[in-house]
Amino acid sequence: MANRYSFEFFPPKTEVGRAKLKDTRSQLAALNPEFFSVTYGAGGSTRDNTRDIVLETKQAGLSVAPHLSFGGDEESEILTLLNDYKTAGIDRIVALRGDIPSGMGATRQVYAKELVEFIRKHTGDHFQLEVAAYPETHPDAKNHQADINFLKAKLDAGANSAITQYFFNADAYFYFLEDCEKAGIDKPIYPGIMPITNFANLARFSRNCGAEIPRWLAQKLDGYGDDQASIIEFGAEFVSELCHILMEGGAPGIHFYSMNQVEPIKRIAEAVMSSHPAK
Ligand code: FAD
């Protein structure tokens, strides 16, 4: 589907967080996204929380995609979750390797491709499967091309489309699309978009996941110091423009990392959806 929009949540740990998420969800639902997705802590650290939020979102009449990864779990635990989701009428999953938190004792991380194969083997074509893609290369990858080859392998294993790690360089996405096409990938790759709200957190998170904050942008954001209002204002303008450039350049839609906040994602999404309506 062209011009597909989706929003990602993480499962809150507290009652206050859950109440806030409900409010965020209902405000973002007014924009009619294709689906919401809910992250998963590899190794089962958020299993119940993720499932609860997913089922509640479904019961609220919304389309929802749980994220899922094996972590160190047994096949039976993953099968139980898949069956719960299927029974609840959920028909989309974001299939990942995940990053198991240190100290959780898993000996081997199960690659996303293996999870895609497992889901297809046990549930056939029931689920629409999304996988992750990395325009700026996954930090563990041997190199850029190897990472693209592994992306192709998980799409060939039966995933329907991919959602990218966030990035702030539009060129990284467009060159990546070209390289994917050269590698024979013909499935849609949706850019994942992160709002800018807190520079210190964003910088730390970006170092861990291998997303680059261009020097000029880092310097500008750092220059605002404690002036949160200016960071949010500039961030919303910059990210809206990034979305616009991506859609003008042929992106098939956008997946927004909402961070469970209505703003600034609603403002950014409204801006891009008004010039590139969902189809
Ligand atoms: P894979 O596709 O399995 O790849 C992992 C790494 O291994 C890559 O470097 C790849 O090049 C390499 N590789 C793949 N196959 C092989 C192979 N056969 N041999 C050698 N190397 C190989 N994390 C969470 O914990 N929970 C979430 O809910 C979550 N949601 C995400 C949503 C999106 C859209 C994205 C982009 C990321 C998300 N992540 C999440 C982060 C993700 O789990 C991490 O980036 C993780 O390190 C890799 O997961 P993957 O599914 O991309 O792994």
Image: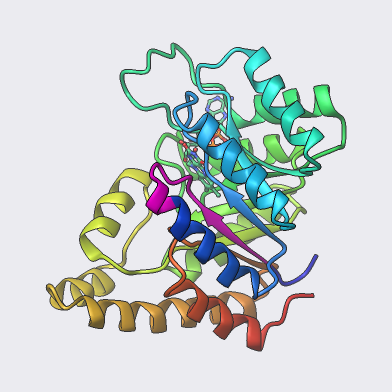
Residue at 46 percent of width and 70 percent of height: 262
Count the numbered circles shown: 0
User: Is 127 on the left-hand or right-hand side of 140?
Assistant: right
Residue at 44 percent of width and 11 percent of height: 107
Residue 31 position by quadrant: bottom right
| Image location (x, y in percent) of residue 221 | 22, 74
Position above or below: 76 against 112:
above
Q: Quadrant of the N terminus?
A: bottom right
Residue at 69 percent of width and 47 percent of height: 183
Closest to the observer: 238 or 230? 230
Position above or below: 107 against 155:
above
Residue 215 position by quadrant: bottom left
| Residue lying at the far bottom of the rendered structure | 275
Position above or below: 263 against 128:
below
| Image location (x, y in percent) of residue 27 | 56, 72
Position above or below: 206 against 116:
below
Is residue 225 rendered magenta in the image? no
- Which residues, given as a range, are shown in magenta? 5-17
Q: Is any part of residue 166 visible from this angle? A: no
User: Is 8 on the left-hand or right-hand side of 199?
Assistant: right
